[in-house]
Structure formats: C-alpha cells, structure tokens
C-alpha cells in the first residue's frame, strides 16, 4: 500500500476535526458514550475521505516502480550449474 500524500493527511485530519465539532454541536450530547461514538464516526469519515482522495499520477508511478536486478555474469551461472 502506498504512503498517504500530504494532501490526504491534511484533508483527512480536517474532516475529523470539523465533523467532530459539527456532530457535537448538532447532537447536543453530554454523555461520554455519545462523545465517544461521535469521535469514532468522525475518525471513520476522515479515513474514508483520506482513502478516496485521488492520488496524483506522479505518486502512482513512484509507488509501482521496481528496480531491475543486475544480470548475473555468465561465469557465475555456469559455476552454479556445475554443483
């Protein structure tokens, strides 16, 4: 899995903060269980926003790059076949 970009982290964090504040103000809850449920819902929403944010093409290319292994010299190949 590729690392999240700075934009994904920023949008996900902002979503968590704003969603938590909005849900707490709208619900008017004062119980610990209600606050915990709202916090969990905001975290889930922030994760959803961060994961679904489109990744730039440059980051996609960077994560799929696998360097080629150097070729094995012929002497070593022949030597390993003799064993």
Image: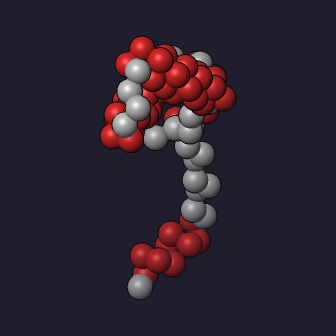
Q: Nearer the viewer, residue 51 or 14?
A: 14
Residue 41 lies in what quarter of the image? top left
Numbered circles on residues, count: 0
| Left or right of 81, for residue 11 | right
Q: Position of residue 35 (x, y in %)?
A: 41, 35
Q: Nearer the viewer, residue 43 or 79?
A: 43
Q: Residue furthest bottom?
A: 83
Q: Residue furthest front?
A: 30
Residue at left offset 41%, top offset 85%: 83
Residue at left offset 50%, top offset 69%: 77
The reply to whether residue 64 is visible in this rendering is yes
The reply to whether residue 40 is visible in this rendering is no
| Left or right of 38, for residue 25 | right
Residue at left offset 61%, top offset 55%: 70
32 is higher (above) or lower (below) than 59: below
Q: Nearer the viewer, residue 16 or 24?
A: 24
Q: Position of residue 23 (x, y in %)?
A: 43, 20
Residue at left offset 63%, top offset 26%: 10
Q: Position of residue 53 (x, y in %)?
A: 50, 19
What colouring does the structure picture have? secondary structure
Q: Residue furthest right?
A: 6
Q: Position of residue 30 (x, y in %)?
A: 41, 32
């Amino acid at each position: 899995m590729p690392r999240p970009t700075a934009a994904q982290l920023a949008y996900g964090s902002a979503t968590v903060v704003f969603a938590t504040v909005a849900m707490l103000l709208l619900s008017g809850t004062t119980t610990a269980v209600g606050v915990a449920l709202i916090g969990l819902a905001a975290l889930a929403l922030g994760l959803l926003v961060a994961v679904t944010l489109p990744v730039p093409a440059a980051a996609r290319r960077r994560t799929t790059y696998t360097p080629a292994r150097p070729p094995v010299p012929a002497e070593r190949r022949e030597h390993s076949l003799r064993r």
